[in-house]
Amino acid sequence: MVSYALLDKTEGSVKIMKRLMMAAAVAASTVSMSYGAGFGIYEASARGNAVGGALVADTFQTDATANYYNPALNAFTTNIQTAVGITFINPYCDVDVDHKSQPRMNSGWFSVPVFYLTVPLPYDFAFGWGNYTEYGLGTTYGHHWDLARDTQKTTMRQITLNPNISYKIMDRWSVSAGLRASWIEFYNRKKPFRGDTLHYGPYSVPDAYHLSSRLHGDDWAMGWTAATAFKVTEDITVGLVYRSKIKHDIKDNFDLAGDVNTPLGSMHQREHTTAGAKLDLPQSVVAGVNWKVTEKYRVGASVTWTEWSSVKNINFRIPGRGYTQDLHWNDVWRYGIGMEYDVLDWLTARCGYVYDMDPSAKNHGTTMIPAGDRHIIGTGLGFKLMEDLYLDLGYSFIRMNNDDRYVKVKDPDGVEHRYKFSTRNGSSHLVSATIRYTF
């Protein structure tokens, strides 16, 4: 049961909460994305990043970030809790096209902000709220690279708003259910016709097409989540989280502009029209176990199954030139393990490892997403700044396996060409910070 002492919190606590919520609102307005395996994003907190996301069943150090890892854990809390944080990500990799070296893919630094709130309610219920990111990508290539027809720059930004209710059925067992309001924004810039030959009756004009296109739009859609947590013993807890599929129908603006050289001279072409794109975000299941080995030492493990096979394609609807980006992805698994140790009363050390499988298909590649399984090594520190105020810092390094995919693109005459797209030395740095407060 919630204690009525919660109603007697000081004005200072209220001010801190207002400031945290304001910081979360500012962060959410500036969100940008990076890439995970597929286009999943799992950077939900500095603590979680450091321990490989192995917090699915953590009833021993439960905080407001449980709204992402397992909302059913909220039912075990007895105080109002909040958390705000951000992860900065810098992905890059070397690129070859048909064994020809290309300019390095380096999209700069991206940010993934988060905000969480947990409020215990009477009769063993609890309300939770999470603002976080589940999907996203960001790839930028040189202006003159060999597959500019497929993409020059692609970004996908997504934000999930997750209100949820949890209930403690008994002292050891809790369940939860919630909604997931998903906002997604998609941007793609490329040169679909660049340097191609124009065939005009008996005439042929080499290097005739110099056109660039831009596709930009967004959409809101709804999904849901359900979760449970069970204490097997006082020191071992298991957890399970289900996230439903979300179907997005993105409303886009399409722009095409550039020059076409003809036998009669150069002609400038410019076109603006409305467009659309259908994209399904896959369902997933996460299972985990956490074990309090001693009062100071804790370990955890998690496994995630994602139904990427449901993302068969991205259907772009553009008047007169719509097309389908075939993907034919595979279902994949993500494995994470982590541990943390209380070095001092005010200092906790953390580390973890994640193996993240790539779902993309060998013969249906796209340069929007570099291919290759990911290995993630995480470390971090937790600081107890005050009695109820905590700061978590984390650093993770992602190493992406070298891999190849075959990319298909069409020229202005509709002839399809097949290229071998290879990514090498793919890496990413992740730097994260989270502030947690308990009222």
Image: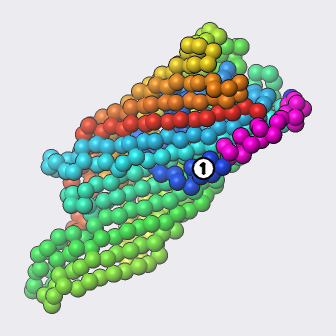
In-image side of 350 versus 77 (left or right):
left
Which SS type dominates the magenta stretch?
helix
Observer-nearest of 389 and 95? 389
- Is residue 184 visible in the rendered image? The answer is yes
Quadrant of the image occupied by residue 166: top right
- Is residue 229 visible in the rendered image? The answer is no
Quadrant of the image occupied by residue 289: top right
Q: Given the current orientation, which residue lies at the most extreme bottom position?
A: 264
Which element carries disc 1, helix, strand or loop? strand
Quarter holding the N terminus?
Answer: top right
- Read off the residue under disc 1: 160
Coordinates of residue 144 in the picture (x, y in percent): 21, 60
Query: Which residue is at 31% across, 64% downward?
Result: 190
Identify whether 98 is placed above or below 333: below
Range of residues picked out in magenta: 2-21
Task: Please check the rendered image and state whether residue 16 is part of the magenta-colored stretch, yes or no.
Answer: yes
Task: Please check the rendered image and state whether residue 164 is part of the magenta-colored stretch, yes or no.
Answer: no
Query: Which residue is at 49% across, 54% downward?
Result: 157
Query: Which residue is at 66% across, 49% downward?
Result: 22
Quadrant of the image occupied by residue 69: top right
Q: Residue flagged by tag 1: what amino acid is it?
A: Thr
Query: Which residue is at 79% across, 28% downward?
Result: 78
Observer-nearest of 81 and 217? 81
Identify whether 316 is placed above or below 205: above
Quarter holding the C terminus?
Answer: top right
Coordinates of residue 197 in the picture (x, y in percent): 15, 74
Identify whether 327 is placed above or below 83: below
Q: Given the current orientation, which residue lies at the most extreme right position?
A: 4
Coordinates of residue 59 in the picture (x, y in percent): 68, 23
**Mark 1 crowd level (few <14, some 14–19, many ≥20, 10 Å Cα):** many
Observer-nearest of 273 and 143? 143
